[in-house]
Amino acid sequence: MTLGKRFTLALVVALTGIGALASAAEPMPTDRTKAHNMVRVGVSAFALPEQRNEFELSTLSTLERVFGKSRLDIHHYSVEALTEAVCRGEVDIFISSAGAARRLVGVGTRPIATTVAPGLDDPNHNEGSAIVLRTDDERTLTELRGTRVAANLPFGFSGYQIALGEIARLGYDPDTFFRDAVFFHKSAAMREVAEAVRGGRADVGILRLCAYESLLETDPELARALRVLPPPEDAADEIAGKVACRVSTRLYPAQGLSVMPTVSPDDSRRLLVGLLTMPPTPDGRAWSVATDFRAVDMLLKDLRVGPYAYLRQWTLRRFVETFWPAIVLFALGVVGLVLHSWRANILVKRREDELALAHHREETQNKRIEQLQHAGAVGQLSNLIAHEVHQPLAAIRLYAEGLERQAAHPATTPDRIASIAGRIAQQAERASQVVDRVRDYAKQRDPVMKAIRVDDILRHLESTYPKLGSMTEIVADDAVRTRFIKASLLEIELAVVNLLRNAREATRGCATPRIRLLVRTVGKNVDFTVEDNGPGVSPERLRALAEPLSSEKPDGLGLGLSIVKHLVDRHGGVLLFAARQDPQSPDATGLSASIRLPVVPSPRNAQYPHEPHDSIGNHT
Amino acid sequence: MKTSPLIRIVDDDEALIDAIRYVVEGEGYLTAAYPSAEAFLQCDDPRAPGCLLLDVRMGGMSGPQLFEELRHTGHTIPIIFLSAHGSIDLAVDLMQKGAVSFLPKPVGSERLLRRSSAHSPMHPSTAPLPHPTRSVHGKRKWSNWLPRVSPTARLPSGSASRNARLNSSARMPCASSAFTVRMNSKQP
């Protein structure tokens, strides 16, 4: 592994650096000792006070022996404070756990001696942790995931970190393995930890090696409420027989004494000799030399602390190496999403385009139909009006030419000429009025709607289309004639005339054509119904007539009816078709077409001259 | 002047009638004007020689219908049709049935007079009168020969006031001043 190589290299560089510093200090030991004559000693608290006191006193007297009492500057630190002091260079010699010592190799720390005790004789393997559960809790370590843990210190090596090392070995992230952690923030908190587990504050307790055995002596009841997890099976062989206490973890070197580069090699040598020759305390504790710190380093690496804290700082490469399967999956997911989004966008765009096109097509079509209908109405109107225009034009031409012919005639007096000229002007005015009316209609898209009396419409109809009466019977009672509808006279007339024309077409082959225009009040509407006695109309044909635009030939009924519909629509009315049923003669057939327009209230103060003033033609 | 032929004008447009009369009378013809075919049948004197200027489209009986009626009963008075809606089909049809001319509106005075004079010669020596072919002695009305036609039968009902005068005059005695035969064009 590249990482492994790099680590080894870093370690070599670090150790070489320590060596260099140590050797650099040698040529002028007097300078250093003179300048910094004092030897600053840091002592980390021991877990078990009674042991600590005895062994600590013995060790400190050894230090006095080696350096002389006047040179010693001894400070007691908590684990955390000691680490900080070492990092600041305020400590030359310190006593700590093997973990703390190895954690600080980066600043030049070098462990030189390790404690041993009866039953903990191997300095390489005389530290570990007991993981305790309540006696009735039969779970294994793996099964304790997500539970609450109790321990003395979050960064205590002996105890908590060693236990977390086992969790890391099992393949879990020790930082998140436990749901919650209870810390007592002091080294000597073994009893509190045990009670937290027994009392249910925590599911798991972590005790330093042999703390459980101490409890068995001091508080057997508390100890018996707890059980110690067995050591990991894969390390059972190397653990077996090494320690006299119950242990749940692999074994590491116990507390030791470390020197900093500020201590001269000579002082170091004399110190080591002094420690190793120190007589064991009455309980058998003594100093020895540990040679194998690999397990400690492995543990620190697993926990990513101390020199391995950099492992917590994610580099891109490390991130990729650690999580490449997840990254690949994520990347695939992202690519998939992008592809999906791209495809969806294309589909949506395509659909939008289709819809826009369809909408545009429909709009164009509607506009064309409307234009066609308008043009059709205008065209029809023009045709009807052409006749009316021709009349005054014909008259004008004849007057003018007659006048020309008779210019020399004795009967052609100035009075006579003036009279004829007046008539010409009159006819010219009449023609221009007709033309204006058509032009106005053609120009305007929205008709000028006003309330008109039905009677006025009928009178106007008769006067505009005088031929109507000869073949059409108009039936309208006085009541309906006084009603008002909102309409454009010109347009409603055109609509009715179209229906009449259709009826005339339908009855062309009849022996006795009969067309009736019935004007009736139906509820709140006025119906203009055109009935004929033409051939019968099938239901299919009736349905076809109700279609918006019949596909009939443009010259025939279709366009005529489409114009009627268009005009009726503009008036807010409806066009109705029915097969005619004549109760008097059941055989009678034919079509009944109705224009139904809503009645409006009569306008106030409106003047309705007897003579309609909105005439197209001027039939007199 | 008693030899002057009578030119009958049947049209529903008062102004056009007036204009035609002005031109035709200017040439010395007698004229008689009728606002409808029905009025013509009721009031015109078939004994007077001349021709008929007949509008195609009119309220009530149309020009071609009147033509059919006259031909059906054997009357051969020369008929010149006037139409603003002249289709070739209609013109050909009417000519084949015996109409002497078919003039589109607006017609020029030159053409109108040429056609009229061709069929209403001022001097019988120039061209013999083509009608009447049947004896019309004692018959002062066209309708006397037209028993199938009732002039008022197909008149429009409920007409507007504007048409009332024309329609009522059609039913009224032919003494109405509006349709008095003008004997002399010199009378304004």
Image (cartoon, coloured by chain):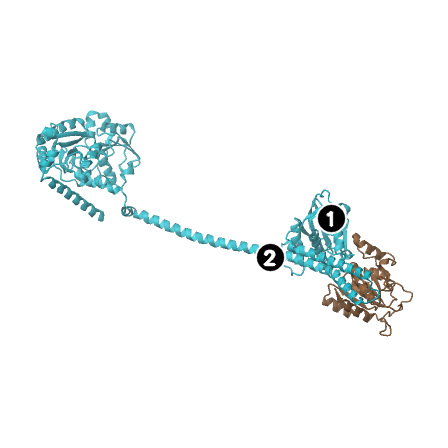
Chain colours: A cyan, B brown
**Given the image, what chain letter belongs to the residue carrying mark 1?**
A
Q: Quadrant of residue A616?
A: bottom right
Location of residue B62 with respect to A235 vertically, above or below: below
Callout 1: SS: helix
Q: Is residue A28 above or below residue B39?
A: above
Q: How many marks?
A: 2
Q: Nearer the viewer, residue B167 or A428?
A: A428
Q: Amino acid at mark 2?
A: Arg
Residue A619: x %, y % from top left = 77, 57
Q: Residue most toward the right? A: B138
What percent of the width, then of the height, locates residue A342? 42, 52
Quadrant for the C terminus of chain A, please.
bottom right
Q: Position of residue A67 (x, y in %)?
A: 9, 31
Residue hosting label 1:
A454
- Front one among A2 and B185: B185
- Tell me if mark 1 has few (under 14), some (14-19) or many (20+) residues whose alpha carbon lies within 10 angstroms of its own: many
Tell me the crowding category of disc 2: few under 14, some 14 to 19, or many 20 or more residues within 10 angstroms, Cα based: few
Q: Is residue B8 left or right of residue A149?
A: right
Instruction: Tell me the distance, in whole angstroms, between the alpha carbons under discs 2 and 1.
Output: 32 Å
Residue A469 location (% of width, % of height): 77, 55
Residue A166 bears which disc, if any? none
The answer to whether residue B148 is visible is: no
Left or right, residue A361 beside residue A166: right
Q: Is residue A420 visible?
A: yes
The one nearer the camera, A415 or B114, is A415
| Residue to which mark 2 is pinned | A368
Q: Amino acid at mark 1?
A: Val
What secondary structure is marked by label 2?
helix
The reply to whether dot 2 and dot 1 touch (C-beta < 8 Å) is no
Quarter of the rendering containing residue A396:
bottom right
Chain letter of mark 2 equals A
Quarter of the view holding residue B148? bottom right
